[in-house]
Amino acid sequence: MRRTQLALIAALAAFALAQPATAQFNPLSIIKGAVEAAVEDRSAEDIAKDTEIKTKITVDVIDKLGSEVISINADVYEQDVMLTGAVEKAEIKVKAGKLAAGVEGVKKVINEILVIAPVAQKKGAVEGFVDDTVIDTKINGLLLDGKGVNVTNFRWRSVQGHVFLFGRAFSGAEKTKAVGIVKGIEGVQSVTDHVKVRAKK
């Protein structure tokens, strides 16, 4: 691992642990993300840009959206942003996309936030709860075990069983395998693929 990447991890860890308990993100997630990013086929500068954008969106954008947000997540890869989660009104989804696009350094915003009315939320709770945390954990484990899949270059989010894949594959075959693995997971309702394909340098 290069010295610049180790320095980046140390800096991000110090930043994360220094944040107040009220911050809208998990410091350990930042550290974990930094460690994973350090083994990607990218420069430390590119990784740092992504981390800065993600922090700005989490702290400055999501806090502005109000009480009609059920949940919103932002994943960043090569300065492209994928927004996922759920809100109660379509205009909140649009606002989230515009605010994210306005963050300095953002190249593109992929807005996959689901609009779920309160009545639909109640109906879904009655008909069957989908544990997205369990699905996310299964994706991590299965992609990690998947031969020929470089899990550190992938990002994913499950929202009520609808999985959104993001990041980069080194080949079309790698991308196809990753999507196939995710589709085969119990509880997954659909898979939306936003994975780039670009060979390793």
Image: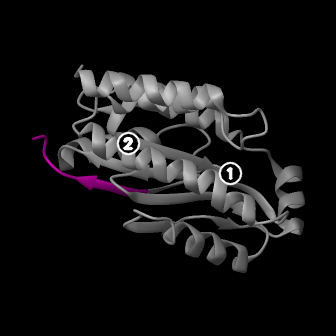
Q: Residues within 10 Å of mark 1 (few under 14, many from 20)?
A: many
Q: Which residue is mark 1?
A: 160
Relative image position of residue 27 (x, y in whole percent): 62, 30
* Amino acid type, label 2: Ala
Which of the two labelled residues, at mark 1 and mark 2, occupies the earlier sequence position? 2
Q: Residue furthest left?
A: 201
Residue 75 vs 185, above or below: the answer is below
Relative image position of residue 12 (x, y in whole percent): 48, 30
Quarter of the rendering containing residue 68:
bottom right
Q: Could you tell me if the residues under marks 1 and 2 are in contact, i.e. CB atoms within 8 Å?
A: no
Please state which of residues 54 and 128 is positioned toward the viewer in this rendering. 54
Instruction: Give the residue at x 51% y 50%.
Output: 54
What separation in Å lies between label 1 and label 2 (alpha carbons)?
A: 31 Å
Relative image position of residue 8 (x, y in whole percent): 37, 29
Instruction: Give the residue at x 62% y 51%.
Output: 58
- Magenta segment includes 43: no
Q: Is residue 33 left or right of residue 43?
A: right
Q: Is residue 119 left or right of residue 131?
A: right
Instruction: Give the residue at x 40% y 68%.
Output: 108
- Magenta-colored span: 193-201
Residue 51 vs 99, above or below: the answer is above
Q: Is residue 5 left or right of residue 83?
A: left
